[in-house]
Image: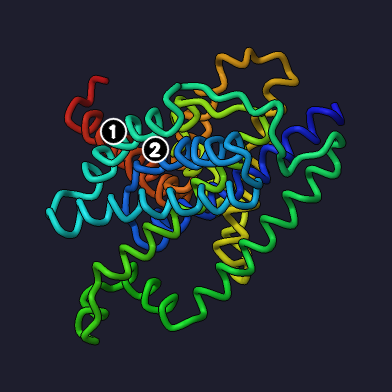
């Protein structure tokens, strides 16, 4: 049980970096960016290429950030310059990055068993390292959102007309947001590759569901705690999400069923957030009153009954 908890915590911290990235596009910009499913493996492949070429893991992590930022720039260019809708822009970038990722290492799977990584033999040390990375990224993001560019990025998500009225270019701030988002997602992919000791072309499959689930779960559990920042909620959500998955495996669920569980978790939490008990009770009472009124009218019209 303890082993499963530690593994889930470790995985949750890795996906916290992913959730922080998608938080920018999903919660701030309201931009349905599917290109993260391309930037996640891109970060893993960029890291693998650099470290297997004999360079340091820090240069590999920097390379993953850069290729992620480039992925976000491509999505933004397709959206803003070619005026293609956000969802389709992300899909096109995702498709493009599939070929790019294969080109980086000329194969679909790269083992990393003999390369340097952030991770040590003790999982507790790994968790501490990951916690420090996540904390540093969270503090940097919070500080960024208090800067002038950060404020304008937040304003772009809230009211594009206001930002344009201030003489600012809305597309510029969307580009910044997409680049930062995908850079963080790619960094998460690079960290995951070190954790599992390989980079694989299918690493990004359904990764957007994991990110959205983390954000939605964090918002659901922390909705009454208004002082907790969105970045913290995303982190808490990722941790809770992986704990739920770990508990499901511990209870005997087959690993092949995890994707179905992931989808069900998202559906349940979205449905719960949209469910209004008072409104439901009001509609139920109206239906009950109407039904009783109809029965009363029927009895009045037919005295024999």
The answer to whether 55 appears left or right of 172 in the picture is right
Q: What residue is rendered at 50% in x and 53% in y? A: 65
The answer to whether 100 appears left or right of 249 in the picture is left
Residue holding disc 2: 38
Mark sitting earlier along the chain (2/1) = 2
Front-lying residue, 214 or 173: 173
C-beta proximity under 8 Å, tags 2 and 1: yes
Picture coordinates of residue 90, whole percent (x, y):
28, 43
Q: What residue is rendered at 82% in x and 38% in y? A: 120
Q: Is residue 14 above or below residue 137?
A: above
The mark total stands at: 2
Picture coordinates of residue 125, whole percent (x, y):
85, 44
Q: What residue is rendered at 43% in x and 48% in y? A: 67
The reply to whether residue 260 is visible in this rendering is: no
Front-lying residue, 110 or 22: 110
Picture coordinates of residue 129, whole percent (x, y):
77, 50
State how far apart marks 2 and 1 are (Cα): 8 Å
Q: Quadrant of residue 141?
A: bottom right
Residue 7 - label: none
The reply to whether residue 15 is visible in this rendering is: yes
Q: Rate crowding at label 2 as few (under 14), some (14 to 19) or many (20 or more) other CA atoms within 10 Å.
A: many
Q: Quadrant of residue 271?
A: top left
Residue holding disc 1: 95
Picture coordinates of residue 177, whole percent (x, y):
38, 63
Q: Is residue 194 above or below residue 222?
A: above
């Amino acid at each position: 049980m303890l082993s499963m908890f530690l593994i889930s915590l470790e995985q949750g911290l890795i996906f916290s970096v992913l959730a922080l990235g998608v938080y920018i596009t999903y919660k701030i910009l309201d931009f349905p960016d599917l290109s993260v499913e391309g930037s996640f493996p891109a970060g893993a492949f960029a890291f693998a290429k650099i470290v297997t070429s004999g360079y340091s893991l820090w240069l590999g992590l920097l390379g993953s950030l850069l290729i992620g930022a480039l992925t976000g720039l491509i999505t933004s260019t397709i959206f803003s310059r070619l005026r293609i809708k956000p969802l389709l822009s992300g899909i096109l970038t995702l498709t493009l990055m599939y070929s790019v990722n294969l080109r980086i290492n000329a194969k679909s799977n790269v083992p990393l068993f003999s390369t340097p990584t952030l991770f040590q033999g003790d999982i507790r040390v790994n968790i501490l390292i990951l916690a420090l990375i996540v904390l540093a990224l969270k503090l940097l993001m919070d500080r960024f959102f208090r800067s002038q560019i950060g404020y304008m990025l937040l304003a772009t998500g809230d009211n594009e007309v206001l930002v344009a009225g201030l003489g600012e270019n809305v597309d510029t701030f969307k580009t910044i947001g997409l680049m930062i988002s995908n850079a963080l997602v790619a960094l998460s992919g690079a960290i995951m590759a070190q954790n599992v000791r390989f980079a694989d072309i299918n690493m990004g499959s359904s990764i957007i569901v994991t990110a959205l689930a983390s954000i939605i779960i964090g918002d659901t559990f922390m909705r009454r705690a208004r002082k907790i920042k969105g970045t913290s909620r995303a982190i808490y959500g990722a941790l809770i999400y992986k704990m739920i998955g770990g508990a499901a495996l511990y209870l005997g669920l087959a690993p092949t069923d995890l994707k179905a569980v992931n989808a069900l978790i998202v559906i349940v939490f979205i449905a719960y957030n949209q469910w209004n008990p008072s409104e439901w009770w009001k509609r139920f009472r109206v239906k009950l009153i109407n039904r009783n009124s109809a029965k009363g009218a029927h009895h009045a019209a037919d005295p024999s009954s």
